[in-house]
Amino acid sequence: MASTTTVLENIRRVVQITIDSLNAWDYETMMAVRSSDFEFRALPSSLEQKVLNSDEFRALWHNLLTPTFKSFKIIPSQRIFDAEGKKAMVYSSLKITIPSGREFEYDMIQIMSFNEDGSLMTRLEEFFDSKAYLEVLESVQNGHGQ
């Protein structure tokens, strides 16, 4: 069993890798620190998004996120780490640009769960400003994203 200090160090490392790889659009590095049974959930539940497994998340990444966003930047302002509970929370500003050049900014909270030693993320729940997110999708669907 890993010490609390080791778990905390691992969680901090995985969180930083996650943020860095998202900002770099580096799917392979991002997924390298996720467990084989990884789950993703977009919140709030009013968006009616189902929990995605790794394969479904890959499809979301390649079929929606990368074609929809020209640039993507997460700017964390608060991080909370819980080694005993194997959890982390990151509050960030998110800046995205769609292919038309239109820019959007909104807030996001990422709640992350980890395996026993904190070396792999097992679940990611992203709670984001759904109004702004829906504006992005509407803009892209109406042809303003091209």
Image (tube, rainbow, N blue to C red):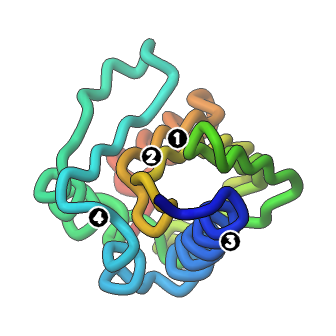
Q: Quadrant of the C terminus?
A: bottom left
* Amino acid type indicated by mark 1: Glu
Q: Are marks 1 and 2 in contact (CB under 8 Å)?
A: yes
Q: Which residue is mark 1?
A: 126
Disc 3 secondary structure class: helix
The reply to whether callout 4 and callout 1 are in contact (CB within 8 Å) is: no
**x 39%, y 73%: residue:** 33
What residue lies at 42% left-to-right and 35% top-to-bottom? 42
In this rendering, which labeled residue sits more in front, label 1 or label 2?
2
Marks 3,4: beta carbons within 8 A: no
Tell me residue 3's x, y (percent). 62, 62
- Front position in the image: 113 or 131: 113
Above or below residue 124? Residue 85 is above
The image's mark for residue 124 is 2
On the rendered structure, is 123 left or right of 37?
right
Q: Residues within 10 Å of mark 4 (few under 14, many from 20)?
A: some
- Who is closer to the viewer here, 78 or 117? 117
Q: Sequence-wise, which precedes: disc 3 or disc 4?
A: 3
Q: Is residue 103 visible?
A: no
* Rendering quarter of residue 20: bottom right
Indicate which label's residue lies in the foreground, 3 or 1.
Answer: 3
Residue where numbered disc 4 is placed: 61
The disc, 4 or 1, on the residue closer to the chain's N-terminal end is 4
**How many marks overall?**
4
Give the residue at x 16% y 60%.
59
Q: Position of residue 58 (x, y in %)?
A: 20, 64
**Distance (Cα) linking label 4 and label 1:** 14 Å
Q: CA distance from mark 2 to mark 3?
A: 18 Å
Q: Is residue 76 left or right of residue 73?
A: right
